[in-house]
Image (spheres, rainbow, N blue to C red):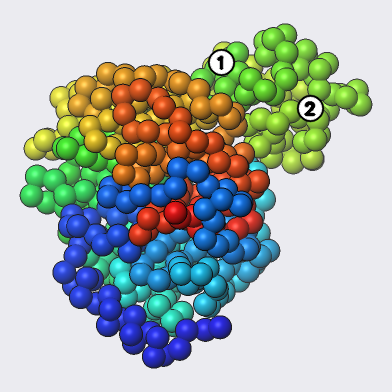
Amino acid sequence: MPATRSVLVLTAALFTWSCAAVSLLGAEVPTSQWPQFRGPGGNAIAESQSIPVEFGRDKNLRWKTELPIGHSSPCIWGDRIFLTAHVGTTLKMICLRRSDGAILWERERSIAKLAVYEHVAGDPANSTPATDGQRVVFQFDDFGVVVLDFAGGLKWEKQLSSTKNGFSYGASPVLDDGRVYLNRDGGLDSSLVCLDAETGKEHWNAPRPKKIGSFCTPYVWQHDGTKQILAGGTGQLEAYDARTGDPVWQVSGLPSFVCPSPVAAEGMVVFGGWTTAHVAGRSRVESVFDVDSGVSPAAMKDPVAFFAQFDTNKDGKLSVDEFPRSRARDAFNFIDKNKDGFVDMPEWAPSYAEVAAAPGRNVILGIAPGTGKGDITATQVKWETTRGLPYVASPLAYHGRVYLLKAGGFISCLDLKTGKAHYESERLGVAGEYYATPVAVGEHIVICAQRGTAFVIRAGDTLEILSRNELGETLSATPAVVENTLYLRGEKHLWAFGN
């Protein structure tokens, strides 16, 4: 049932004081807020909170609510949760009541057609909303930006050209100090855009020419007396002045295609990742098949042997059902270059070529920008690692450590200042993809495997897995934590767990 106007007035009265007094970036944010992707400050940290170590379909469950398809993470302010979803060509903006999971209202926009994405995880509702307690910013790459009030009333909207990302758009809007920051990499007008949150008027537009589509959410960072916006993509991490959009510094030598977003702590910025575009030959083939995929050693080395193993009807081509469960199967549409619904030998054999598909390299960098200006790669990069790199999940910087989550179910823990490994590529025990960023909750870290397992590990210098919690549906969205309650958005439901 829609929220009444009286509820809206009460809500506004309760939250206006915190909006005026608190910047979502630098100040202490009340625990009743998880206002954007990765929560307060974009850091994926719920420092002083406590959640159950064990939870599941019948354990420590407060409620669950069925939702349409979408991969956005929960955006929370007070007793409101905001999410995006879609049903066919109908894009949905949804508000739930946090106390019981009831859907309070839905608003919709329509698009002409649903894109056929290159990857099975592609979805028009990937972007997490952002809020400041007065307004909620929703972004759909196929449509643009829609800003609503807490009752679902329209404040403004701005249609934008698509970034034409074949793997769908993954970056989320960031709302800070009355400004909205958008990653527009990949289109004809690649740029970092700053809009006025109240009116939608453009404050500035920082061109990012020749930027390939990236999934990197902008990161707001207070440094050296100024507020900066960090944006990664196409082999670089760049910092912009938040007031003007002027470039401040950049670091190069990073992946061309980047899914993780940067994070900062204790004067250090951590950024980078991994992509198949920078590996070749057998290493590339092995990177897309988990140990449980069943691909034989011969098939790992030779495309003819691969066809012999998996072309079950011996018709000289592979359907998506003939591929083993793997990243290759997930990206079937990308491999199927002529879009005939099959992968033939000329389409599959290049996967084994000893040539990287794009310039750049797979790496995570630890950067101490200091007062550096311009290209600071040679002077301010303090460490790098090329092991245990994340494909999608962003790094987590917490209590002087950096946690990296690698596809296939491997976790590493590094020293924030030096990059030295406390432990490296330790197995969690569930293979497959890890799309969700790890979230720190008190002395624990929550890790979600896409296959439907949520781990709780202890934060520290050694890996200690405290629990494996099965939800029975896939998990792609990053968790949210508010007032000692864990919110997980699965393939079919939003779940709330608490003691």
Viewer-closest of 133 and 334: 133
Q: Which residue is mark 2?
A: 344
Name the image quarter holding the C terminus. bottom left
Q: Residues within 10 Å of mark 2 (few under 14, many from 20)?
A: some
Give above or below for 231 relative to 32.
Answer: above
Secondary structure of residue under mark 1: helix
Q: Kindly report the distance in space between the C-alpha atoms of the residues bearing marks 2 and 1.
A: 21 Å
Looking at the rendered structure, the kind of residue marked 1 is Ser
Labels 2, 1: front one: 1
Residue name at image x 62 percent, y 23 percent: 290
Q: Position of residue 427 (x, y in %)?
A: 50, 22
Q: Dividing the image into 4 quarters, which one contains the N terminus?
A: bottom right
Q: Nearer the viewer, residue 110 or 383?
A: 383
Q: Position of residue 148 (x, y in %)?
A: 42, 76
- Give the vertical position of 468 relative to 116 (above or below): above
Disc 1 crowd, CA 10 A, few/some/many (<14, 14-19, 20+): some
Q: Secondary structure at mark 2?
A: strand
User: Which label belongs to residue 283?
Assistant: 1
Position of 262 compared to 453: left or right?
left
Residue shown at the point (44%, 20%) measured from the top left: 425
From the viewer's perspective, tell me whether residue 2 is left or right of residue 115.
Answer: left
Provide residue 64's location: percent of width, then percent of height: 58, 61
Name the quadrant containing residue 387.
top left
